[in-house]
Amino acid sequence: MDLNLIWFVLLGILLAGYAILDGFDLGVGILHPLARTDEERRLVMGSIGPIWDGNEVWLVTFGGALFAAFPEAYATIFSAFYTPFMLLLFCLIFRGVSLEFRNKVESQQWRRLWDFAFFGASLVATFLFGVTTANGLLGIPLDERGEFTGDIFDLLGPYPLLIGLLTVAMFALHGGLYLHMKTEGGIQRLFYRWIWHAWGLYLVLWNLATMYTLVEIPRATANFHEAPWALGVVVLNVLAMANIPRCIFNHRIGQAFLSSALGILCQVTLLGVAIFPNLVTASNDPEFSLTVYTAASSQKTLGIMLIIAFIGMPLVVTYTAVVYWTFRGKVSEDVYGH
Amino acid sequence: MFLLADLDVVMLSRIQFALTIMFHYLFPPLTIGIGVVLVYLEGQYLRTREPIYEQAARFWTKIFAVNFAIGVATGIVMEFEFGTNWATYSRFVGDVFGSALAAEGIFAFFLESGFLAVLVFGWDKVSPRFHFFAALMVSLGSIFSSIWITVANSWQQTPAGHHIVPMMRDGKPWVVNGEVIRRAEITDFWAMVFNPSSMNRLVHVWLGCFILGAAFVMSISAWYLLKEKHHEFAKRSFTGGLWLATVSSLAMLVSGHFQAHKVYETQPAKLAAFEAHFKTGPADMSIIGFPDEKTETVRGNIAIPGGLSMLLFNDPDASVIGLDRFREEDRPPVAISFFSYHIMIGIGVFFIGITVLATVLRLRDSLFQRRWLMWVFVWAVIPAFIANEAGWVAAEVGRQPWIVYPPFETTETGERLINDAGQFVYKEQDGLRTTKAVSAAITAEQVVGSIIMFAAIYILLFIVWVYVLHQKIKAGPEEVVTEVTTDKAGGALGAAGARVEHRESLTDAKKK
C-alpha cells in the first residue's frame, strides 16, 4: 500500500465520518418542520446543539486534507463546482447561524425565519452533496491541464438529481432515527411514524438509483474484478438496509441508527471502489482524468501529513467521545436553552 | 453593483476574498482575546470559589459563543475559496500550504468545536474543574488555529523550506501547451513552519487579538459602569481587560519595531509602499499625508525627518530602498498600503495612550469616576477592530503584485542582482503573480453573483450579530445560584429545589 493509496483511504474515512455525523444533523434539519410547537422545535434543534459544529469540522478537515494530499483534484473540483459550492456555503452559513440564533430572541417572526432557514439550508445542502457525489461517479469534461470545460448544466443531469433526492431520503431517515433516540413522549411517537415514511422513500429511491447505476454506469462495478471484496461490501450494505425496518419494528432504534450509519459507510466505500484510481474522472477523455497519482502532492508531503494524521486522529476520536458522552441521553429543555 | 460588471475575474476574486476574509476576521481575534479572559476567570473561580467569577465567566461565555458561531460559519468560506476562485494558486501551493491548512483542521478545529460544546452547554453537566479544562482547550484551539493559518500566510510572504519543481508525468516533466507545469514542494517542514517572518507575525497577530478581546470586554464593562449596573462585575472585568490591553499595547510597540525590520529585510518594496517612500535615500516617517503615485510625492505630508532611516538603521541619514528600485510591474499599490499601515499605527499609539493613562488612574483608584474616559473605552473597541483589519490589509496589499512572493535574483556572491536601470529583479519563476493565480474554469458573471450573495448574507449577519449582542449586553450577567454549582453534596432534594430557581433564571436570560 503506497502513500497515495493510504491518503485515498483516509479521505474516504473523513468523508464517511462526515456523512455519518453531519448526515444525522442535516436529517434533523430536514425533519425540523414536523415539530409543531415552539418547545418541540427547540428540542429538535437542541438535540444537535452541542455537536453540530464538531460534525461540520469533518467536512472542513476533509477539504483541507484533499487540498494538501491531492491539490490538483481539490482545485479542479472546487472551481468546476463554483456555483453549486457557493450555494452550499450559503446553506452552511445559514444553518449554523440559525442553530445558534433561533432561541436568542423571544419573537415569533424571528423564530419562524430561523426555522425556515434551518430547514431550507439543511435540505438544499444535502441535495447538493448528493449532486456532487453523483458527478464524481459520472465524471465531468476536463481539458489537458485538468481544468473543467463544461458549465453548470453539465452538472445537473437526471442521475445527479436522482442521487440528490436519494441523499435527502437517506439523511432524513438517519436524522429521524437520531431524533427518536434523543426525544421522548408525543414527539418521539411523531418521529416514529416519520421514520417509516423516510424509510419507504429511501427504499424506493435506493432501488431506482441502484438500477440506474448498474445499467448506465458500467464503471461503478468495473473494479470488482480486481477488488472482489467489494462484493462483500454490497452484501453488507443490503443487510444493513434490511436490518433497519426490522429494528424499527422491534423499537430497537439504537441498532437501526447503527445500521443506517453502516449503510452510509458501505456506500462511501463502494463509491471509492468505483472511482479508483481516479479522483476526478474526465468524461470526455480518460487520459485527462486526475488520479491518486497524477493529482497528488509529493511523497514527502504525503508522509508528513500521515504523521500529522497519526498524531491528530486519536486526539479527534478522544474529543468526539468525550463530547458525545457528556451530552448522552435524552435532550431536555433546561439544559440546551442557553 | 454595476461597477462590478466591468471587472475581470482576478479583480472580482480579490474583492470577494477581501470581503469574506475581512468579515470573518471580525470574529477570530475576539474569540482568541475573550478566550484568554475566560481561562483567567474560570481559573480564578476554581482557585477562590467566589461566585462573582462564575457569574462573569458565564456571561462572557455567552458573548464568546455568539462570536464563535459567526466565526465558524464564515470561516469555512475561505477554505472553499482557495479552490473555487484561486484554483491555479491552489495547484501551485497545495503541497506546502495545504498541509498547514490540514494541520489546522485536525489540531485546532476539532479541539475548539469539541470543547466549545462543553464550555457553552456543560455548566450543569460537568465539574467546575472539567469546565475550566474545557475553557483552556477552546482557548488553546483558537490559538493553534491562528498558528497554522499565520504560518501558511507567512509562507506566502517569505517562502522557505520548499523548492519549485516541475510536476512529473510518467517520470517526465509535465508539459501543457508547451509550458512546463511547476509547483512548490516541501523540502523541510520545520523550515516552512519557521519561515523568516512567521514567528514575528504570529506574535503581532496575537497581540492584536489580545488588544481587541480586551477592548471588547472593557467596552461592555465601561458601559455598565456608566449606566451604574452590575458594578462589581464590571469593575473586575474592566480591570482584567485593562491589564491585558496595557501589556499587549506596550508589547505591540516592540513587536511592531521587529516587524518593520523584518519586512524591510524580506520585502523592501512593501515597506516602501507603507511609507510611500518613492525615491531611494534617507527616509522620513510620515504621520499624516496623501500619497500620489503619479507624481511620486506625498501631499500634505507631516513627517518626522529621517524617521524611517532612524527606525531601521539608528541613523537619520541612512539610505532606505525606495519604490524606484523596483520595476513598475513589481510595485505594490501605494495608497491602500500607506493608509492601512498608518491607520494601524495611529490606533496602536492611541491604545498605548489610553491604556497607560487608565492603568495609572486605576492604580490610584480614581479610574472609574472619570466618566469621559469610560466613554472613550465604550467606543475604543471600534478602532481596535479597525486596527486589526487594517494591519492585514497592509500585509496583504503590500504583498502585491505577488500571491507567493518570489526571491530576488542574486549574483554569484549571493548579493541582490541589479539590472541596467538600477532596479532589483525577482526570480519570477519561483513565485506566483496574483493575476496568474485565479481559476481558469470560472467566469466573471459567476463571481459577481457570489459577491452579491456574500454581501447580502454578511449585511444580514452583521445586523443579527449586533442585535443579539445588544440583547445579551442589555440583559447583563445573571445572578448565580451558588448552591447548584458549588455545593455538590446538597442531595437530590436540594439540587431539585435549586434547579427550579435555576431554570427561572435561565428563562429570564432568554427573555433578554
Image: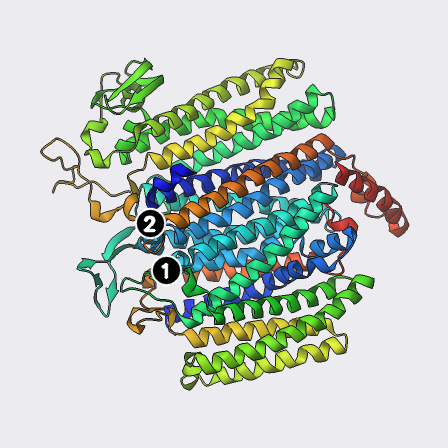
Instruction: Count every numbered label the image shows and give the total.
Output: 2
Residue highlighted by disc 2 = B438
Tell me the quarter of the picture where residue B413 sits.
top left
Side (left or right) of B24 relative to B490: left
Amino acid type at circle 1 is Thr
- Identify which residue, B287 or B293, lies in the foreground: B293
Which mark, by number, is residue A76?
1
Tell me what residue is drawn at x 75 percent, y 70 percent. Answer: A193
Residue at position x 26%, y 18% in the image: B315
The crowd level at tag 2 (other Cα within 10 Å; few <14, some 14-19, many 20+) is many
Q: Quadrant of the C terminus of chain A?
A: top right
Q: Is residue B432 visible?
A: yes
Counting from the top left corner in percent of width and height, residue A317 is at 57, 61
The numbered mark at residue A87 is none
Kindly tell me whether residue B131 is visible in this rendering.
no
> Residue B306, how many percent across, how many down?
28, 16
